[in-house]
């Protein structure tokens, strides 16, 4: 009696994974990379720290624009880890310094997630969220939504998309949009997730 149940379970799991793999999400992945190039950056108002902020921003832009071949990925992973290390100093001048370092570390994790294979990216995304959750909601909302978009990209890439994940991303926007003043950011995030949702439901 156990054998038919096991076979049915395996077939259900297979069809679940194939559901997102058989759909064409190419335009959505392009929209996601354009979104990341535009929004995944850290603007530092303090000129003293501008050089370090620019270093992180230039690096992640290169990652999202895919200005590299697969042979370069190990070196890029090393660079991302170095950026994380450089922004792990535990002595802070003030609260702004805490925010600055925390966001830069989270961006390093996002870069690692984008560069990683299907077995490693979830861990780096979890680490990025863990860093950002150390900050107050009015400081981390936008970056947490960017982590969602990187997760969405990887789920599309590796065929792990689920309705539960899409719903979580939509609910996260409802929770966090009150802390985000950039309406274009909110609109583009919503459009990306809603478009993927429509295709998933077809």
Image (cartoon, grey):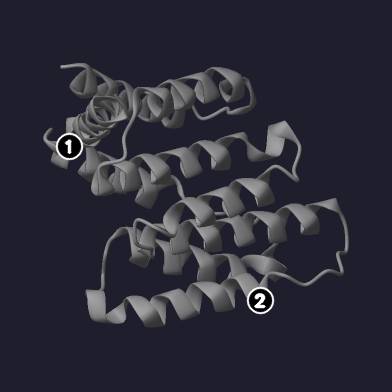
Q: Is residue 78 left or right of residue 91?
A: left
Q: CA distance from mark 1 to mark 2?
A: 36 Å
Q: Is residue 124 above or below residue 178?
A: below
Foreground mark, 1 or 2? Answer: 1
Q: Residues within 10 Å of mark 1 (few under 14, many from 20)?
A: some
Q: Is residue 125 above or below residue 148?
A: below
* Rendering quarter of residue 71: bottom left
Quarter that holds the C terminus: top left
- Residue indicated by mark 1: 25
Q: Are marks 1 and 2 in contact (CB under 8 Å)?
A: no
Q: What residue is drawn where x is 88% and y is 64%?
A: 93
Q: Is residue 67 left or right of residue 178?
A: left
- Residue indicated by mark 2: 86
Asked whether residue 188 appears in the rendered view, the answer is: yes
Q: Position of residue 102 (x, y in %)?
A: 69, 56
Q: What residue is drawn where x is 48% and y is 78%?
A: 79
Q: Residue 121 or 85: which is nearer the viewer? A: 121
Q: What residue is drawn where x is 26% and y is 31%?
A: 3
In the structure shown, which secondary structural element does the residue marked by tag 2 occupy? helix
Q: What residue is drawn where x is 87% and y is 69%?
A: 91
Quarter that holds the N terminus: top left
- Along the polypeptide, which appears first: circle 1 or circle 2? 1
Asked whether residue 45 appears in the rendered view, the answer is: no
């Amino acid at each position: 009696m156990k054998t038919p149940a096991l076979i049915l379970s395996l077939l259900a799991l297979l069809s679940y994974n194939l559901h997102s793999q058989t759909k064409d999400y190419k335009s959505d992945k392009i929209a996601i990379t354009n979104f990341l190039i535009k929004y995944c950056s850290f603007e530092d108002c303090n000129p003293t720290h501008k050089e370090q902020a620019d270093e992180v921003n230039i690096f992640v832009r290169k990652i999202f624009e895919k200005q590299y071949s697969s042979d370069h990925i190990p070196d890029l992973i090393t660079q991302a880890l170095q950026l994380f290390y450089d922004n792990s100093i535990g002595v802070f001048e003030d609260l702004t310094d805490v925010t600055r370092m925390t966001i830069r570390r989270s961006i390093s994790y996002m870069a690692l997630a984008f560069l990683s294979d299907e077995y490693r990216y979830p861990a780096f995304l979890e680490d990025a969220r863990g860093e950002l959750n150390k900050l107050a909601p009015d400081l981390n909302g936008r970056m947490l939504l960017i982590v969602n978009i990187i997760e969405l990209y990887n789920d599309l890439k590796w065929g792990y998309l689920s309705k539960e994940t899409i719903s979580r991303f939509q609910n996260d926007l409802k929770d966090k949009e009150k802390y985000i003043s950039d309406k274009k950011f909110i609109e583009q995030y919503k459009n990306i997730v809603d478009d993927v949702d429509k295709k998933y439901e077809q």
